[in-house]
Image: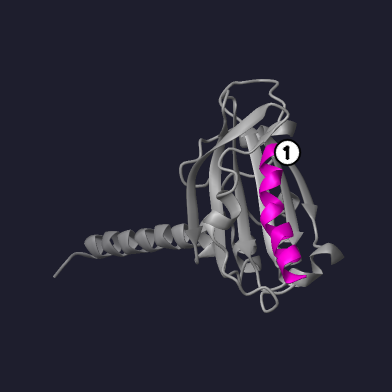
Amino acid sequence: MPSRTLIVVAVAGVLAAAGVGLYVATRPETGPSPAFFRGEPTSALYAPIATRRLDPRPLTGQEVFGASPSPAAQGVTMERREVAVSDDCAEALWGSAVKAAASGCARVARAGFAASGGGVSGQYAVFDMADGASADRLVAALDPRRGGGFLRLAPGQQAFDAARSRAEVRALGHFVVVNWVGPVGDVAGDDLTFPQLALDGLGAFAQARVLAAG
């Protein structure tokens, strides 16, 4: 028969393994968050696309990114990288609270971008929510001050310094758009205004839907 010492050691090993498994399963998920955040709820302007029922056409990467593969503003060109479209919206997010707020999201389309002259990286993401109310809830949940999580880097996106990054998150009817840019590496003093302004033009897909609905 095994000795009492061996039994104690074996039990301790099992408990230790169980403890590690529990920690891995319950530890908080972490990821990058922007240093500057601006969130906006939807408005009456987007009433014609306030719900997916009113605006049932599926969201596509071509619709959002096809017209402007290299959006530009004030001499800054943001060159598009890989476009990713998924029906699993949670895969684009980290943090349990943000993922919960994205419940009911039908599709996410996103792409990474890099400034043609270097120094700035970013991404633009669009979440297809059920209605304006759920879109507003996701915008609120993405606020880093809530600590509930944020976006993962888009496929093919160059990593940037999140501690100096800026994000604008807006609800446009039943859509949520995230415009997130940041400096790359040790580059200091790069103005993120125009890179973010260039990506902001990608929101034209929502205005086109409003016009089509009218």
Q: Which residue is mark 1?
A: 197
Q: Residue at x 84, y 63 (%)?
A: 45
Task: Indicate the quadrant containing the C terminus: top left, top right, bottom left or bottom right.
Answer: bottom right
Q: Position of residue 182 (x, y in %)?
A: 64, 34
Task: Indicate the quadrant containing the N terminus: top left, top right, bottom left or bottom right.
Answer: bottom left
Q: Is residue 212 magenta?
A: yes
Q: Residue at x 19, y 64 (%)?
A: 3
Q: Is residue 91 left or right of residue 78?
A: left
Q: Nearer the viewer, residue 163 or 206?
A: 206
Q: Is residue 94 left or right of residue 3?
A: right
Q: Kindly identify the amino acid type of the residue bearing the numbered disc 1.
A: Leu
Q: Is residue 149 magenta?
A: no
Q: Residue at x 34, y 60 (%)?
A: 12
Magenta stretch: give its range. 198-214
> Does the image show residue 207?
yes
Q: Position of residue 189 (x, y in %)?
A: 70, 21
> Magenta: predominant secondary structure element?
helix
In the image, is residue 131 above or below residue 24?
Answer: below
Q: Residue at x 52, y 36 (%)?
A: 159
Q: Position of residue 153 (x, y in %)?
A: 53, 45
The quarter holding residue 94 reads bottom right
